[in-house]
């Protein structure tokens, strides 16, 4: 979309007040699916299970198959509801949401409708400047995920224009909790930032609860952003759009800001907003219209007759409440103090969504500064190049092993980066990579001295300069030695040897 | 040899136990009977290809001292609504033509574990929608008592097969009377257990909150023996009842030996014996009531006012659930696929498949159910129907505070002529008025023969109803009444089906 169709963000906010709401889907990491004994791909460490291998008759809607509720998924959902500050319904109910689409084997989705398991909550979210915002939660309900369609043969990879489509039902029936916020007003310039901070808080929360891997790049955590504008002074909400496919923290912020700018331009020109689903395009940074959402959408909800109501006894709820981990905001404040990071450094980690990784790495025994350096530096850079989440690239144990080799002096910074890249590419543990590739720092003085001699032969004046006190002149020789040794030398040791040499030959 | 098709399943079991006959011999006799009569009756949609092998295995097991159940080695017919891995399963629909499920229904697994010998899959109205078996996507089944008459439905195949001695017992399914009404039409015994008593796993769903699998037989004891085989908790069916059941066979045997009905309180549901009941059926019903009184039973009239709305409520709940349950038949993963000319979308293919694969009655109910669930209509239709359901349950609960069992005719008429109601769906639906309240309330119901109608000489059925979980009470009293009626008539009606050929 041309920028002419967008209004400047600040100008948009002069004219209109933005109201946002978020629907976050969390895939639970239970061993089996929501309503069947099929293995749950969202529980698997490795990505990329072969298509249509995690199936029971229910997952593909075979005649005669019946759902049975996964008790662990219910417990996970209650824990999440409690962490979101919600009331837990003593009795909640599943309903059928009916619509024909090939990603649903039964052509209905089992979801919760008017009787969700958790409702009326609130989550404290910390913004970049450290201020806290309470995000009001309307409900959190249980449902099953749908399968995945791959459209083949079209130009866009979408169903329109495709020659045919492939269906993978592995994801069909994966347990989901959908968390729906109430409309959030009064955030003004920070609406996008709030969306990012909120989803990152939910991610930290479900990770701390241990109920989801919460990898956005794998779709374990998905966010739909609802945005509407109302003219300043107007009480009623404007028409909203629902932007889907917003699958990174950064893109949530961008998508919200984009919709504010797009809608403002339309409204200011006297147009009206179509109530519709829109798709976020990460590459171009725009949203495009999907299906119009109108009264024509009639899901014919009715209570799922194959399932009994879900009962949550007060004993169960209280035992789950007692086991709740620290709230994300409290945990952040505690960690920041423990690690002694500056506000800026700590906030940068939170904003990057890397707090769980850094935390786990420090817990594994790595020095906080080193943990921060790896995640915020090299791993973020590689992730950015490859368009994936940093969390998918390395494990805390891997970083620990790598840092240990550095601390022992067996790797220098340059070699360590090479080893890290090999780790990311799955070549094994740091020790294995060092052994296999022969990447260790050369600590044999004999080899270093030979290389130094060779470099000095080409530039004999250096030793005199050092003797005259111009120690920085050693830099040229260090550079030459490092080059000759292909980086596998300990630069500090080379420097020592050169200075030693200068004083010996005086 | 052919005699073995003239006796009850209990009698076959006794002969097998005493070594007087083998399962192979019994099975051979029934297969021969099926071969001889099937061309006339059309009870079956599929025949087992390995019945004799299963029978031989049963004989071998018995020779090793293994008898996994009272009915081990006894043949059985299975309604085509249950999934079987070794026989095509269609639920009477062309949309599933040729489909072989990758799994057995829990009930089928139990039959196999019990050592029973499946003979084949029986004909039914498509997806169990109908009361005459004329809505089968394949062929019409004839009533063995008069082959110009309907055998009832939807389980006309199972009822006709048992009545005509093609099988000693059969499995049926009952959503609004599909076991009991065909039993009444064919002079057999049919039972709809308490909702949740028998697993629905692997039973192709019509209306999930109403469907229940049950036995079809020629004697109350046979139904009880089969009930004991198929009942019990199934973790694959969330609506299955976890509490264990008493032996229905013991209850039936106890009932058959009862000297009198002294102390038994019987209620006649006013709303189920009035309008719509044919004079000939009413006359047989009154005789049955007189028989009870004459043997010391206490008979009282019961008012269940909301039964008046049962048919209307049923024809909202059922289509609503069915419209959703039948959405899976879309050609994408299994079953029929019709691909229209040109460059069709997946919606076009789904639509063409459903248009060609479903019959008119199925389409009628899907459209009705879709409408009843639509936004803006839900409360008025589905919501109201569920309220009626609650009121009917309350009526029955109050009635069972006063009486042990309730009685009504099992069907308002005897078997009607084939074709008579085919073009008049409302008349067809009205014929379910006596059986539907039982499904809506989730209670058990049984139909036993109560004599031939005076006008057309065809069987009539007496319906017994008990509180939920009290299925054994039906078997006890049912067996007593069966004996009293047999003593009165001098012959057991279910054993007197005409020869057909």
Image: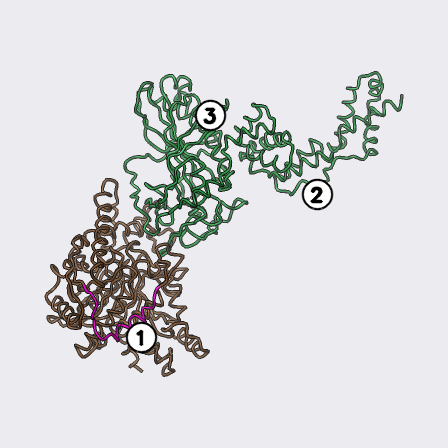
* Residue at x-position 48% and y-position 27%: A126
Secondary structure under tag 3 reads: strand
- Whether residues under marks 3 and 2 lie with C-beta atoms below 8 angstroms apart, the answer is no
Which chain hosts label 3?
A: A
- Mark nearest the camera among 2 and 1 is 1
Residue linked to disc 3: A132
Estimate the spatial distance between the alpha carbons at disc 1 and disc 3, rounded to whole Å. 76 Å
Asked whether A383 falls inside the magenta stretch, the response is no
Badge 2 crowding class, 10 Å Cα cut-off, few under 14, some 14 to 19, many 20 or more, is: few
Q: Which residues are magenta?
A: B245-266
Estimate the spatial distance between the alpha carbons at disc 2 and disc 1, rounded to whole Å. 75 Å
Q: What is chain A's hue in the picture?
A: green
Secondary structure under tag 2 reads: helix
Sequence-first tag of 3 and 2 = 3
- Whether residues under marks 2 and 1 lie with C-beta atoms below 8 angstroms apart, the answer is no
Q: Do pointers 1 and 3 mark residues of a single chain?
A: no
Badge 1 crowding class, 10 Å Cα cut-off, few under 14, some 14 to 19, many 20 or more, is: many
Which chain hosts label 2?
A: A
Q: Nearer the viewer, residue A402 or A365?
A: A365
Residue linked to disc 2: A436
- Where is residue B478 drawn, in percent x and y? 24, 69
Q: Is residue B483 above or below residue A317?
A: below
Which chain hosts label 1?
A: B
Secondary structure under tag 1 reads: helix
Badge 3 crowding class, 10 Å Cα cut-off, few under 14, some 14 to 19, many 20 or more, is: few
Q: Is residue A234 above or below residue B129?
A: above
Residue linked to disc 1: B9
Left or right of A403 on screen, residue B377: left
Left or right of A168 on screen, residue B228: left
Letter of the chain shown brown in the rendering: B
Q: Mark yes or no: residue B343 visible.
A: no
């Amino acid at each position: 979309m041309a920028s002419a169709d967008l209004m400047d963000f600040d100008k948009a906010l002069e004219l209109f007040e933005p109201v946002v709401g978020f629907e976050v889907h969390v895939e639970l990491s239970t061993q089996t699916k929501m309503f069947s004994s099929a293995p749950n791909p969202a529980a698997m460490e490795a990505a990329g299970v072969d298509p249509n291998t995690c199936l029971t008759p229910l997952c593909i809607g075979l005649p005669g198959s019946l759902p049975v509720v996964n008790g662990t998924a219910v417990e996970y959902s209650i824990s999440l509801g409690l962490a979101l500050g919600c009331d837990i319904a003593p009795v909640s109910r599943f309903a059928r949401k009916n619509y024909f689409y090939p990603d649903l084997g039964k052509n209905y989705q089992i979801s919760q409708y008017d009787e969700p398991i958790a409702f009326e909550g609130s989550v404290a979210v910390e913004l970049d400047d450290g201020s806290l915002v309470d995000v009001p939660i309307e409900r959190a309900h249980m449902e099953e995920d749908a399968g995945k369609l791959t459209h083949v043969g079209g130009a866009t990879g979408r169903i329109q224009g495709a020659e045919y489509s492939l269906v993978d039902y592995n994801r069909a029936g994966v347990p989901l909790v959908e968390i729906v916020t109430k409309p959030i007003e009064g955030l003004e310039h920070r609406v996008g930032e709030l969306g990012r901070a909120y989803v990152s808080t939910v991610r930290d929360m479900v990770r701390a609860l241990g109920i989801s891997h919460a990898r956005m790049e794998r779709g374990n955590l998905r966010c739909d952003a609802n945005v509407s504008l109302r003219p300043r002074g107007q009480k009623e909400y404007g028409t909203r759009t629902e932007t889907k496919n917003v699958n990174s923290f950064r893109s949530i912020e961008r998508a919200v800001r984009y919709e504010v700018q797009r809608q403002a331009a339309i409204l200011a020109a006297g147009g009206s907003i179509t109530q519709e689903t829109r798709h976020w395009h990460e590459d171009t940074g725009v949203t495009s219209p999907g299906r119009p959402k109108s009264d024509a959408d009639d899901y014919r909800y009715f209570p799922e007759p194959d399932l009994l109501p879900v009962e949550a006894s007060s004993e169960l709820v209280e035992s789950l409440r007692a086991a709740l981990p620290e709230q994300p905001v409290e945990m952040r404040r505690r960690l920041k103090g423990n690690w002694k990071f500056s506000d800026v450094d700590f906030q940068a980690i939170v904003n990057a969504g890397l707090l769980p990784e850094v935390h786990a790495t420090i817990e594994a025994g790595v020095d906080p500064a080193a943990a921060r350096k790896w995640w915020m530096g090299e791993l973020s850079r590689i992730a950015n190049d490859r368009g994936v989440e940093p969390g998918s690239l390395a494990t805390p144990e891997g970083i620990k092993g790598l840092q240990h080799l550095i601390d022992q002096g067996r790797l220098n910074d340059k070699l360590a980066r090479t080893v890290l890249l090999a780790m990311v590419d799955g070549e094994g543990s740091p020790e294995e990579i060092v052994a296999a590739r022969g990447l260790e720092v050369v600590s044999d003085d004999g080899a270093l001295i030979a290389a130094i001699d060779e470099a000095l032969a080409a530039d004999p004046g250096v030793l005199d300069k050092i003797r005259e006190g111009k120690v920085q002149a050693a830099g040229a020789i260090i550079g030459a030695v490092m080059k000759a040794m292909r980086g596998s030398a300990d630069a500090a040791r080379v420097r020592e040897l050169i200075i030693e040499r200068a004083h010996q030959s005086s | 040899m052919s005699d073995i098709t003239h006796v009850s399943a209990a009698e076959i079991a006794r002969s097998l136990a005493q070594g007087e006959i083998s399962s192979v011999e019994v099975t051979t006799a029934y297969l021969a009977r099926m071969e001889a009569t099937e061309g006339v009756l059309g009870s079956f949609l599929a025949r087992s290809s390995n019945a004799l092998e299963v029978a031989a295995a049963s004989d071998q097991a018995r020779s090793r001292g293994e008898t996994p159940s009272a009915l081990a080695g006894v043949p059985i017919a299975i309604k085509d609504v249950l999934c079987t891995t070794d026989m095509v399963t269609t639920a009477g629909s062309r949309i599933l033509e040729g489909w072989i499920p990758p799994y057995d229904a829990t009930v089928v697994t139990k039959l196999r574990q019990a050592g029973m010998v499946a003979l084949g899959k029986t004909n039914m109205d498509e997806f169990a929608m109908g009361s005459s078996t004329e809505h089968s996507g394949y062929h019409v089944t004839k009533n063995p008592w008069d082959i110009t008459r309907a055998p009832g439905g939807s389980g006309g195949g199972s009822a006709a097969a048992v009545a005509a001695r093609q099988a000693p017992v059969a499995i049926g399914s009952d959503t609004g009377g599909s076991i009991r009404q065909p039993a009444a039409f064919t002079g057999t015994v049919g039972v709809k257990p308490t909702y949740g008593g028998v697993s629905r796993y692997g039973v192709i769903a019509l209306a999930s909150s109403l469907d229940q699998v049950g036995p079809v037989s020629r004697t109350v004891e046979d139904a009880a023996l089969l009930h004991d085989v198929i009942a019990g908790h199934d973790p694959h069916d969330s609506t299955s009842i976890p509490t264990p059941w008493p032996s229905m066979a013991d209850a039936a045997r106890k009932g058959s030996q009862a000297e009198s009905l002294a102390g038994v309180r019987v209620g006649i549901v006013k709303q189920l014996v009035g309008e719509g009941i044919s004079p000939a059926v009413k006359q047989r019903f009154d005789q049955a009531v007189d028989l009870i009184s004459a043997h010391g039973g206490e008979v009282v009239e019961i008012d269940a006012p909301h039964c008046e709305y049962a048919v209307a409520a049923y024809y909202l709940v059922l289509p609503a659930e069915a419209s959703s349950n039948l959405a899976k038949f879309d050609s994408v993963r299994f079953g029929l696929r019709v691909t229209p000319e040109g460059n069709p979308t997946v919606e076009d293919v789904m639509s063409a498949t459903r248009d060609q694969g479903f019959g008119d009655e199925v389409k009628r109910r899907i459209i009705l159910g879709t409408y009843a669930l639509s936004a803006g209509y839900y409360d008025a239709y589905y919501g109201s129907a569920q309220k009626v359901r609650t009121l009917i349950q309350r009526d029955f609960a109050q009635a069972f505070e006063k009486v042990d069992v309730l009685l009504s005719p099992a069907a308002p008429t005897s078997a009607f002529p084939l074709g008579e109601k085919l073009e008049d769906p409302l008349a067809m639906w009205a014929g379910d008025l006596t059986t539907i309240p039982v499904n809506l309330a989730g209670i058990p119901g049984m139909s036993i023969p109560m004599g031939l109608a005076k006008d057309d000489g065809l069987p009539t059925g007496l319906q017994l109803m008990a509180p939920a979980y009290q299925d054994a009470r039906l078997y006890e009293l049912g067996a007593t009444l069966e004996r009293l009626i047999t003593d009165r008539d001098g012959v057991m009606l279910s054993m007197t089906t005409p020869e057909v050929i």
